[in-house]
Amino acid sequence: MQDLSSTIIAKSDQLNAVDLMAGDKIIKITKITQSASAEQPISIEYEGGEGRPYKPSLTMRRLLISCMGKDGDKYIGNSLQLYRNPEITWGKEQCGGIEFSHCTGIDGDISVVLQTGRNKRKRFTVKVLNVEPETIDPAIEEWKLKFSIAETKIDIDKLINELKETELKPESKKAIGVFYKESLERVKEQE
């Protein structure tokens, strides 16, 4: 299967609803920052976000606080399941927006009625997100060993060509890239 979802990511400094057209996204929170912006005062950094934070709307900020409390530092390490709600409007246009349906760090499902606009209220239900413990791709250790024993730039180039032909998860390739850089530096020092 060719996953084409990476081809529809918006060129932006934040996660956008259009990025979730291919399906839900589970994010693991790594950092919360506040800014002076009136419309988007919170940025939620997450693993693999590559500098494109989730900036929750006012309603989603209210829902976050309803679920996890007002101390943003306690959100770090928790996960959210984000989805695109096509009914959300921006101005008068129904263009879709990002909401969350599940999160870790709660003891049970939470249901709350929140204001979504002038004289508009909506019930939101957030379910407990069960995330499986992280497993390390065994291929990472295999490639680490291969790069650690490479003795020349030619050896490293052969490994890179082999790596290009190997089907791996993007996060595994990213981790393996670190070993590639380390082996290059080691070989340059030996020359």
Image (cartoon, rainbow, N blue to C red):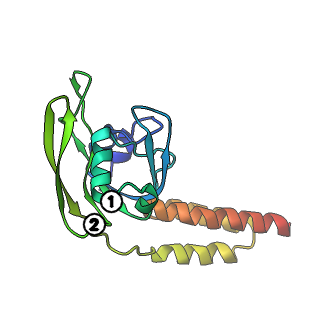
Which residue type carries mark 1? Met
Quadrant of image for the N terminus = bottom left
Residue 82, visible in the rendered structure = no
Q: Which residue is mark 2?
A: 106
Which residue type carries mark 2? Ile
Q: Secondary structure at mark 1?
A: helix
**Marks 2 and 1 in Cβ contact (< 8 Å):** yes
Pick whichever of labels 2 and 1 is earlier in the sequence: 1
The residue at the point 67 percent across, 65 percent down is 156
Residue 29, visible in the rendered structure = yes
The residue at the point 56 percent across, 66 percent down is 176
Characterize the local packing of mark 2: few (<14), some (14-19) or many (20 or more) Cα atoms within 10 angstroms.
Answer: some
Question: Where residue 88 sits: x, y (%)?
Answer: 21, 34
83 or 37: which is nearer to us? 37
Relative to 176, say whether 45 is above or below: above
Question: Where residue 48 sits: x, y (%)?
Answer: 46, 55
Q: Residue furthest right?
A: 191
Quadrant of image for the C terminus = bottom right
